[in-house]
């Protein structure tokens, strides 16, 4: 299992629900974690992942739990042979604290942290929280092993990263609910590998989603009135578009013609799109090295 890494002391973070997203996390500390743990993340088995403890103010998360939206038709209930859970993706139902946490993890500083940690450039958060947000699994609930959906169809993006923030104070691992990460079919493949991450309070699990078999199979045995709670976010990248660089245009001001600008525009029109695509890939490779 990946070893937990505590952030700065939770008491060092503001807990006022009136704070702004940039105050929710210590972004400088996040970048230090990304630099120190990027190799661990990318080399983790059975697929790239990490868990981090203590990133948030505990008082802030307690407030997010207290603001859990009431049961309504705007919660989506899944009750099949494969899963038993509820999801609320409508941030309009969230209380102020949860809404600010959501915006903080959809913000540029957190996206930069994810890019540095995972090595995936150009990550895009989902402002619609499609299938994300609050997740609640009640006693007897479970989530069968599965591969996540691969695309966000509304935005036409490829899914790349999951982030799960657990909100379960005083959770007893004997109740179940551990996130299982599997390399492949645990029944048919003798090379099968598994990692289990208990859903403990103020713990964040981050993992690559393509070809990531995961779930929590055993029905929960937590007491009545308790549930396995988390907030979730999904991050995407835009599919590559051949010739995109050739179509890109800088700001153009009206006025006297600049001979240099005319020459650059003519060169762009005459250069084959494949040249721009090769240059872009080379630039990304140099940036990662």
Image (cartoon, rainbow, N blue to C red):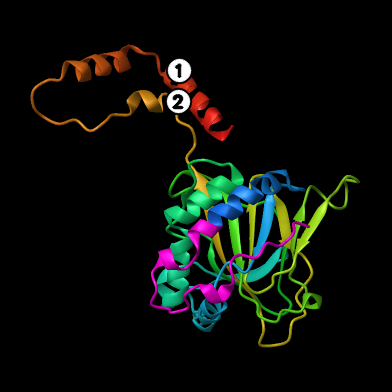
Measuring 48% from the left and 42% from the top, which residue is drawn there? 122
**Numbered-mark total:** 2
Measuring 75% from the left and 76% from the top, which residue is drawn there? 220
Measuring 61% from the left and 65% from the top, which residue is drawn there? 7
Viewer-nearest of labels 2 and 1?
1
Question: What separation in Å lies between label 2 and label 1 (alpha carbons)?
Answer: 8 Å
Q: Name the residue under label 2.
A: 242
Image quarter of the C terminus:
top right
For the residue pair 10 and 245, the one nearer the viewer reads as 10
Left or right: 18 as drawn, with respect to 260? right
Q: Do the residues labelled 2 and 1 touch (CB within 8 Å)?
A: yes
Q: Mark 1 points at which residue?
A: 274
The answer to if 274 sits in the magenta stretch is no
Left or right: 264 as drawn, with respect to 54? left
Identify the magenta region.
1-29
Q: Is residue 282 above or below residue 95?
A: above
Give the percent coordinates (x, y) of residue 124.
Answer: 46, 48
Give the percent coordinates (x, y) of residue 152.
Answer: 50, 49
Furthest residue toward bottom:
224
Quadrant of the rendered image containing residue 143 = bottom right
């Amino acid at each position: 299992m990946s070893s937990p890494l505590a952030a700065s002391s939770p008491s060092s973070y503001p807990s006022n629900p009136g704070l702004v997203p940039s105050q929710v996390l210590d972004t400088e500390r996040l970048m230090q974690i990304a630099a120190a743990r990027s190799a661990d993340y990318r080399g983790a088995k059975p697929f790239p992942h990490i868990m981090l403890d203590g990133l948030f103010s505990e008082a802030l998360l307690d407030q997010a739990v207290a603001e859990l939206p009431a049961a309504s038709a705007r919660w989506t209930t899944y009750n099949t042979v494969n899963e038993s859970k509820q999801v609320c993706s409508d941030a309009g139902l969230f209380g102020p604290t949860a809404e600010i946490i959501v915006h903080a993890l959809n913000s540029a500083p957190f996206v930069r942290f994810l890019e540095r940690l995972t090595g995936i450039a150009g990550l895009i958060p989902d402002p619609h929280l499609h299938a994300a947000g609050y997740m609640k699994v009640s006693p007897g609930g479970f989530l069968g092993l599965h591969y996540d959906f691969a695309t966000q169809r509304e935005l036409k993006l490829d899914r790349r990263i999951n982030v799960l923030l657990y909100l379960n104070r005083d959770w007893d691992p004997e109740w179940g609910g551990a996130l299982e990460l599997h390399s492949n079919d645990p029944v048919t493949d003798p090379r099968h590998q598994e990692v289990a991450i208990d859903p403990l309070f103020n713990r964040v699990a981050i993992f690559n989603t393509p070809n990531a078999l995961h779930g929590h199979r055993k029905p929960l045995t937590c007491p009545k009135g308790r549930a396995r709670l988390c907030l979730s976010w999904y991050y995407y990248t835009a599919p590559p578009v051949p010739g995109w660089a050739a179509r890109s245009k800088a700001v153009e001001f009206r006025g006297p013609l600049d001979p240099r600008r005319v020459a650059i525009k003519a060169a762009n029109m005459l250069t084959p799109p494949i040249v721009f695509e090769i240059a872009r890939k080379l630039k990304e490779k140099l940036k990662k090295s």
